[in-house]
Each structure stands twice: as C-alpha cells, then as structure tokens.
Amino acid sequence: MKTILVPVGSSKHAKSHLQYAVDFAKAFGAKLYVVQIYNVYTKAGTMIKIDHILERESKDFLDDLVSSIDTKGVDLSTRTFKGKLIDTLRKICNALDVDLMLIEPRTNSIKDEVYLGNTSGKIVKRTQIPILIVPENYVYKPIVKILIAMKSAIIKKEGVLNPVKSIKNQFKAVTNALLVKTPYHKEDDFILKDELKGMLTNITYAESPTTFQAVLEHYKNHSPDLLCVVRRKRGFFSKLWENNIILKKDFHSSKIPVLVLSGMK
C-alpha cells in the first residue's frame, strides 16, 4: 500500500476523516494525496470566469484543513482539480497509481439517517479503485479482525485481494470469511483459490437472499473491526443503490470501516 487518495468535500467531519487517513497512511508508510474537485457553473447571462477563484478557494481550504491536524510526518500533498467528479477521480487514480481511496460515508449530506450519501454512493458504484469507507468521527485503531463477505469466491482478476492482504499483513489481523449461498448460487462459487484460502482463519457458510442480508444476520457473531465486500454490478450494496443512498437503518454495521474491493471477475 504505497499511495492513498482522500477526496475532500464540504463535510463537517472532514478534519476527523483526514486525521484518520493520516494515521492509516502512517501505519503503511504510504504517500497521501488530499484532493478537492470543483466544477464551474457560470451565472446565466454573464461571461464571468470563476475558475481561478474556485481553484484558489479549494487550495486554501485544503491547506487550512491540513494545518488543523497532526500530519505525523506523513508524506502528504494537496491538489485541486476541475472537472466532473467521477471522471476526474478515475483520471487521478490512474495518474497517481492510487492503491486505495478513503472516503467519508457522507461528503455533504446533513441527514442523520443516511449512512452512504449520494456523492459517496456514486464514487463507490462508478469507480473500480479499492475504497475504504470510514465512519464519521471514527478514531484510528489497529485492525484486529477482518470479515470478508461474498457470494462467490471466484477470482479472475489479478491483484483484487491486494488491499485486504496488505491490511491483514500490516496489522496481523485475524481474517474470516462469510460465504453466502444466494438464489443465484453456482456450483463453483465456494471453491477457494489458495491465495484467498491462505488468508483465512475461519469460514462461515450462510444461505440468504443477498450477501447484504447475510451480513446483517451474522455481523454481531463476528464483531469485526473491518468489513470487506466485493464490488459487483448487482452486489453487496446494490439493493440500496438505486438512488446512490444507503440508510443507517438498513446497514447497522455502519460503525466500522468498510473496505470495498474492485470486481473479482
């Protein structure tokens, strides 16, 4: 884990989120990029260009934010970018060779009942970079127990497990798996490759309509410090993603970080 990206929005929890990112990056000796993406909306009937104003304000905001936390000697850079959020994030991740993106569940939502807000939901759903969703005001602590939840253990893409392997090895975390038999289960879904099998201490098998529902049912039995799920077209969060929003009442494990891996196939 060499390069970590932290997109910053207008959230009131931006300071605590960045402090977590710094502490997390320090554990890995990783480079940290803190970025803000802005778009330009010109006022109707005017020709005023405000690019330079927004860029300066974004840069000042990031500098003030960084100066308000303890950077603990972490190699940290701030950057501002103009463009559409998702397209720009994809380009940034490619250009900087990002290994992991850290996001807040809600970058600008003020509704307390919301777990994953509209902007964060779009980032998770429409990008393929591994993402760590860190709860609001969550204080950094070493990760002791990891739960990987999936309905299929078939891995066709190389490097998909790298983020969770890196976290497991760094913290020497006990890693367990919850394999969920859904109505779409195929015979080979529970055949584990050596790479995954070698990471696991225990495997729990469950039968449920969705992986999401199985996690809700088994979460308390495992009490993980980190939940790891796989990004799929109709995957873990899909039943709640139609509006890019997930509610806390539908996801009560929202008090721990959630690692979202890129697609395995």
Image: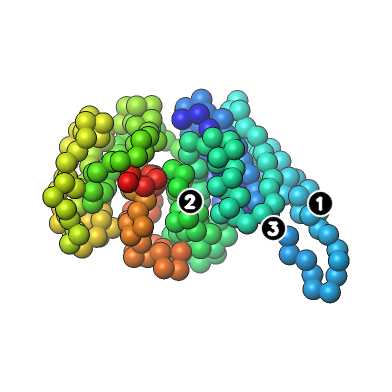
* Amino acid at pointer 2: Thr
Q: Secondary structure at mark 2?
A: loop
Compared with 71, 182 (above or below) is below
Colouring? rainbow
Asked which secondary structure carries label 3, the reply is: loop
**Where's residue 196, x and y in %?**
25, 35
Instruction: State the image coordinates of residue 57 (x, y, percent, origin top left).
Output: 76, 51
249 and 235: which one is in front? 235
Amino acid under disc 3: Asn
Circle on res. 127: 2
Would you name the residue on which mark 1 appears?
Answer: 52
Of the image marks 1 and 2, the number of the one nearer the N terminus: 1
Q: Nearer the viewer, mark 1 or mark 2?
A: 2
Q: Residues within 10 Å of mark 3 (few under 14, many from 20)?
A: few
| Residue drawn at x 36%, y 61% as measured from the top left | 238
In three-dimensional space, the C-alpha distance between marks 3 and 1, rounded to whole angstroms, equals 11 Å
Residue at image x 27%, y 48%?
Answer: 149
Q: Earlier in the sequence, mark 3 or mark 2?
A: 3
Q: Which residue is mark 3?
A: 39
